[in-house]
Image: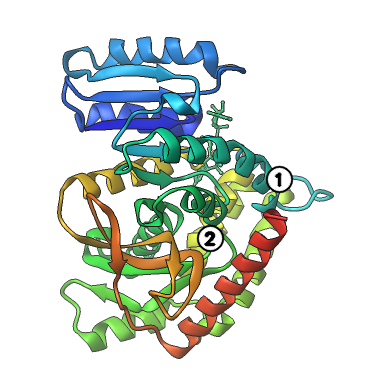
């Protein structure tokens, strides 16, 4: 089993590499490939990073290889995390960060990798996309390669966050909560309250707990609530009271915290790289386990879920072969409306970004 990390010199890539070695996911005969650019800082820094990894994990290190061209990638699982990231605009006169800003830059980075994997790869690689905007980059890879082997991380991580935030609000452990977030990894997230189950709670106890912590009575009202509460938090953060902003954040409803949490983290000047790397490696572990698992992830659909075509966060069954099919999870009317709105929003953006 070989794993390649495209963008290994970046902060998310580095955390992924270190966690993969820490968890001993690879045997000494397996290979971890660190992929960077032949120009720029990674051309030399990756050699130093490899040395640091060897130093840290000497006893159980796999072969660590460096690739500085897309066509040199050889791996069974490819983690795509190269690209520009959101920068905080923690200033009143500047607009909040937008995923749109990243699109054309990151699309141009992804295309040569997608082309090279299609041309030189084994044909069985699984590509996990972390780079944002995740729907666009998933589409880029699926345009060149088997769409069933391209999985975007956004909805997976949003679902983990949703589970954690629901658990925190109702005072149980995250492991006790099952829940999914579909739609867009961004403003068009669709938290599925109808999918929430809590271990040890009856249906009526779960419904009561949800009523107490949910942001809006219906999913359709969620975007408006999210916008209003995010604006409030931004205002507090922009006035320089970061501690107060995080304190107010803690009182927000769980579905709103899913979106505002990473936003506020970036706004504070920190990054979401550790959580993202951890979630990505968890997904790799799920794939390696060989068991069919249902997750939410960005995939390119061809009518399999609610007759939608194109990239969107959907419930899929993953296995070592990629995503085998969708899991037909029922959505409430409001959730379905929100989901279709997210699909339209993604498609509008893709038209713009691909023009
Ligand atoms: N899905 C999520 O929840 C999530 C969370 C965090 C970051 N991200 C995304 O992951 C990406 C990386 O984020 P980061 O914080 O690690 O950024 P970073 O700037 O720390 O790292 C990006 C790395 O990509 C490398 N790179 C640029 N062009 C390249 C190329 N052509 N080939 C190989 N490497 C190249 C850069 O040298 C850099 O090392 C961003 O697009 C970011 O938006 C997604």
Q: Quick check: is the Cβ at mark 1 less than 8 Å away from ligand 1?
A: no
Task: For the C terminus, give its image quadrant.
Answer: bottom right
Task: For marks 1 and 2, give the CA distance.
Answer: 21 Å
Q: Which residue is mark 1?
A: 240
**187, 25: nearer the viewer:** 25
Residue 290 image position (x, y, % from top left): 15, 50
* Secondary structure type for disc 1: loop
Q: Which of marks 2 and 1 precedes in the sequence?
A: 1
Q: Is residue 314 above or below residue 32?
A: below
Q: Residue at x 63, y 46 (%)?
A: 267
Residue 177 image position (x, y, % from top left): 26, 67
Q: Which residue is mark 2?
A: 259
Is residue 39 something one can see in this rendering?
A: yes
Which label lies toward us, 1 or 2? 2
Q: Which mark is residue 161?
A: none
Q: Are marks 1 and 2 in contact (CB under 8 Å)?
A: no
Residue 263 image position (x, y, % from top left): 58, 52
């Amino acid at each position: 089993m070989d794993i390649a990390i495209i963008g290994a010199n970046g902060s998310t890539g580095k955390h992924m590499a270190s966690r993969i070695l820490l968890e001993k996911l690879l045997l000494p005969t397996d290979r971890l490939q660190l992929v960077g650019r032949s120009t720029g800082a990674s051309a030399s820094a990756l050699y130093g990073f490899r040395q640091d990894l060897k130093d840290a994990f000497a006893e159980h290190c796999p072969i660590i290889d460096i690739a500085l061209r897309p066509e040199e990638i050889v791996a069974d699982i490819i983690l795509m995390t190269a690209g520009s990231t959101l920068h905080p605009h923690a200033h009143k006169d500047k607009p909040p960060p937008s995923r749109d800003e990243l699109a054309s830059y990151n699309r141009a980075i992804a295309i040569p990798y997608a082309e090279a994997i299609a041309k030189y790869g084994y044909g069985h690689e699984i590509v996990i996309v972390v780079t944002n905007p995740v729907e666009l980059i998933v589409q880029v890879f699926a345009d060149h390669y088997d769409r069933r082997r391209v999985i975007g991380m956004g909805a997976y991580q949003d679902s983990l966050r949703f589970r954690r935030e629901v658990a925190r609000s109702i005072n149980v452990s995250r492991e006790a909560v099952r829940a999914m977030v579909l739609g867009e990894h961004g403003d068009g997230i669709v938290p599925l309250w109808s999918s929430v189950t809590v271990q040890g709670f009856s249906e009526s106890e779960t419904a009561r707990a949800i009523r107490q912590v949910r942001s809006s009575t219906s999913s359709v009202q969620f975007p408006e609530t999210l916008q209003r509460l995010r604006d409030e938090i931004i205002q507090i953060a922009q006035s320089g009271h970061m501690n107060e902003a995080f304190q107010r954040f803690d009182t927000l409803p769980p579905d709103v915290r899913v979106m505002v949490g990473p936003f506020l983290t970036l706004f504070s000047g920190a990054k979401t790289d550790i959580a993202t790397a951890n979630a990505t490696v968890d997904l790799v572990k799920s794939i390696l386990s060989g068991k069919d698992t249902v997750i939410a992830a960005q995939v390119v659909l061809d009518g399999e879920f609610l007759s939608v075509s194109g990239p969107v966060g959907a419930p899929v069954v993953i296995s070592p072969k990629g995503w085998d099919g969708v899991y037909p999870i029922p959505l409430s009317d409001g959730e379905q409306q929100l989901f279709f709105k997210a699909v339209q929003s993604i498609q509008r953006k893709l038209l713009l970004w691909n023009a």
